[in-house]
Amino acid sequence: MPIKTCQIDCKMKTSKFGTFKRVVIKVGSALLLDKHGEFNNVWLDNLSSEITSLKKSGTEILIVSSGAVAIGCNILKKSKSQMSLNEMQAAAAMGQAQLVMEWQDSFKSKNINVAQILLTRADTENKKRFLNSKDTLSSLLDYDVIPVINENDTVATDELKFGDNDRLAARVAQMAMADLLILLSDVDGLYDSDPKKNKNALHIPTIDKISNEIINMAGKNTSNYGSGGMVTKLQAAKIATQAGCATIISNGTHEKPLSSIIQGGKCSYFSVDSNSILTRKQWLAGYLDVSGSFKIDHGAQRALYEGGSLLPVGLMDVEGDFERGDIIRIMNDDDQEIGRGLTAYSSEEAEKIKGCQSDNIIKKLGYKNKSELIHRDNMALFQSKV
Ligand code: GLU
């Protein structure tokens, strides 16, 4: 699908708000349910209309939505404090069904399909599961569907839990290679002290680096500072910006929360961290645990430098014993390493499809994971020309 663009201009610092193609929007429980526990359908319909407009202008959207536990508690007429972990997980299972239905209903009138994705931390940390989840998200976006993602609360035990959907949203942004993460909460962003306690607290509109000084601003004010807490929001911003995804923390309680950002409303903008990981591909380049190598021909090398993916047709040799999702060296025909990437095929499969046209993969294997051995999004080249 051709990716068009969305322009988010911010009166505060227009230059910081470039062109965003893929945006993850995190919505907290407190925005979806009012203080009586009633579902806030009017607010959700406004948000889904705004999202529809962004989609029409070509922006791809992924939603990370909390609310399962809160809705489940309402159905059971119990508060979280009255429940054990298992009871809360049961509440989440009940609430999740309604939660995704509300999103579905709201987008139905706009002719947009949504899909439910439930993730645990292991899905973002285990290579194979990461790649599977990433591929599914990418297929949904290709189908023009909005993924509505939540933590898989019913299976995530304490150690498996992300603990909060801010960090889950940051991992999703990393996985989906989004360029913008928007954390909608009940605060206008970062202040140098708690604005609820100090009316002179200074709002920080743009943050270029999440330094210890910045972390300390939130550290002092965790208690009543938004639903997930400012500390976890900053941790999320750090994960996302280090993965090449800018982050906005904004107040979602406005009637039209996204328009408020676009029109230059108060929010905090965290720019991509250029010092730690320059691009989201750099972790690939620096990854030490390399499992094997693909030797490729000159034509394939040229295609890679022109921005293409590595196709089986250009593969000359396979070295090593590896699985799908492992990191592989890409060697040219002079035996020089020119880059690294995540392979979509195991060494055994790659050996079988070596030199074959992508259309013939099914004939050789009896199935097809992908047309590419290594998709260009999953590849880091060490230099940009031959
Ligand atoms: N996964 C939880 C839920 O849907 C929310 C966690 C959070 O808000 O950070 O209720």
Image: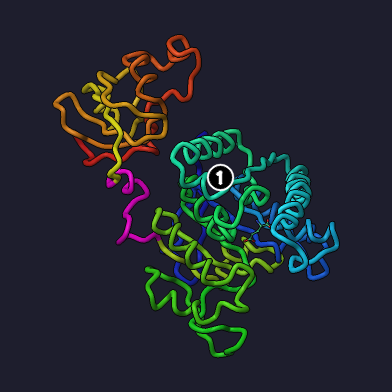
Which residue ends up furthest to the left in the rendered image?
334
Mark 1 residue element: strand
- Residue, x 48% and y 49% (percent of image)? 178
- Residue closest to the eye, 221 or 319: 319
Q: Is residue 10 above or below residue 324?
A: below
Q: Residue 7 or 66: which is nearer the viewer?
A: 66
Q: Is residue 97 left or right of residue 251?
A: right
Q: Amino acid type of disc 1?
A: Glu
The answer to whether 359 is drawn above or below residue 302 in the figure is above
Magenta stretch mostly in which secondary structure? loop
**Who is closer to the viewer here, 300 or 365?**
365
Q: In the picture shown, does residue 233 fall above or below 281?
A: below
User: Residue, x 22% and y 35% (percent of image)?
Assistant: 338
Residue 14 on the magenta span: no
Residue 148 in percent (x, y) is at 65, 47
Point out residue 336 in the picture as x, y percentages from the top left corner. 16, 32
x and y, in percent, of residue 352 in the image: 36, 14
* Image point (40%, 53%), residue name: 243
Residue linked to disc 1: 60
The number of numbered badges drawn on the structure is 1
Ligand 1 quarter of the rendering: bottom right
Q: Is residue 163 left or right of residue 246?
A: right
Mark 1 beta carbon near ligand 1 (under 8 Å):
no
The residues colored magenta run 272-286
Q: Residue furthest top?
A: 363
| Residue 70, horizontal then vertical, whole percent | 75, 61
Residue 100 visible: yes
Q: Is residue 306 visible?
A: no
Q: The C terminus is located in which quarter?
A: top left
Position of residue 220 in the picture relative to residue 46 (left or right): left
| Of 68 and 141, the residue lying toward us | 68
